[in-house]
């Protein structure tokens, strides 16, 4: 019974930023339970190919979509990629993001735009591209990756935090509009996770210890901590969850 609830065999998932980190872990988790996967990535060919081969070893199909979500032709380019490969997307996981660490009064217009485009605009564009197929099947799953900073914003990441808060507002809006069409949409908000992005920060033992003291569970999370929850939300096990903002942060978002 449990395996049937999580079974997503025959579904095709698009995961942005899936070459490494959280995106890779989610891609492998969905493939393990039956999904074929489109791996979007920006530049690291080696890591993306490694993810692709790992998915194929599980007996699933996998496609590499090397594409920078900053592009102004995202919708047209994705539609072309989808038609060329004869793909229809059933599961959309919006994981890719840009994060700039800088004091609020030092943020440049270019840095503001890049974070808003990738973290917010590209999410809406890909949803617009994928939802028509989901509607035609009366089944679809959308998961966005937010951040603990939605409720506990960092002084160094004002734009990143704002973009993630905006993304969740979009999730709530769409949950009401897509629910009667068999589509769920939810937001996963990770805390501090051991990824390449956080490697430099966490390499400083003093900083790492300070962060761990702010986490009730007392330790840094791993990408797989997000993958298990994403699997729930992308399968029929999570069919009655929509519009949710689920923190996977070891309790870091809890009030002091």
Image (cartoon, rainbow, N blue to C red):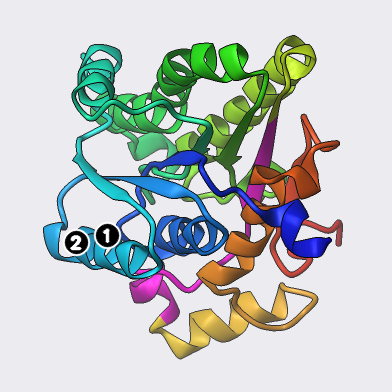
Q: Quadrant of residue 27?
A: bottom left
Give coordinates of residue 52: x percent, y percent. 27, 59
Give coordinates of residue 251: x percent, y percent. 79, 66
- Determine which residue is flagged by label 2: 49
Give coordinates of residue 63: x percent, y percent. 26, 45
Query: Where are the magenta residues, as a range?
Result: 185-202
212 sits to left or right of 202 = right
Q: Residues within 10 Å of mark 1 (few under 14, many from 20)?
A: many
Q: Quadrant of the C terminus?
A: bottom right
Residue 22 highlighted magenta (yes or no): no
The residue under the point 75% across, 41% down is 245
Give coordinates of residue 242: x percent, y percent. 78, 32
Q: Is residue 70 above or below residue 20?
A: above
Q: Secondary structure at mark 2?
A: helix
Q: Secondary structure at mark 1?
A: helix
The answer to the question of whether label 2 and label 1 lie on touching residues, with beta carbons closer than 8 A, is yes
- Determine which residue is flagged by label 1: 52
Question: Given the current orientation, which residue lies at the most extreme bottom position?
Answer: 205
Foreground residue among 41 and 116: 41
The residue under the point 57% across, 20% down is 134
The residue under the point 31% across, 63% down is 56
């Amino acid at each position: 019974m449990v395996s049937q609830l999580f079974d997503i065999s025959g579904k095709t998932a698009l995961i942005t930023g899936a070459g490494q980190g959280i995106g890779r872990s989610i891609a492998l988790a969905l493939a393990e339970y039956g999904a074929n996967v489109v791996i979007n990535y920006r530049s690291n060919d080696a890591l993306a190919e490694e993810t692709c081969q790992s998915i194929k070893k599980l007996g699933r199909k996998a496609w590499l979509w090397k594409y920078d979500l900053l592009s102004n032709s995202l919708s047209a380019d994705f539609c072309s990629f989808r038609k060329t490969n004869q793909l229809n997307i059933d599961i959309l996981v919006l994981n890719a993001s840009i994060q700039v660490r800088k004091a609020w009064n030092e943020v440049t217009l270019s840095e503001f735009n890049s974070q808003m485009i990738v973290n917010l605009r590209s999410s809406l564009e890909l949803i617009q591209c994928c939802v028509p197929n989901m509607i035609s099947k009366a089944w679809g799953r959308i998961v966005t990756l937010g951040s603990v900073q939605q409720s506990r914003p960092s002084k160094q990441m004002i734009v990143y935090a704002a973009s993630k808060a905006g993304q969740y507002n979009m999730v709530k809006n769409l949950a009401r509009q897509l629910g009667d069409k068999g589509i769920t949409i939810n937001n996963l908000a990770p805390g501090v996770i051991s990824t390449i992005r956080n490697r430099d920060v966490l390499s400083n033992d003093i900083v790492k210890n300070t962060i761990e003291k702010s986490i009730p569970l007392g330790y840094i999370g791993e990408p797989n901590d997000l993958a298990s929850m994403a699997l729930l939300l992308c399968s029929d096990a999570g069919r009655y969850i929509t519009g949710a903002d689920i923190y996977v942060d070891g309790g870091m978002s809890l009030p002091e």
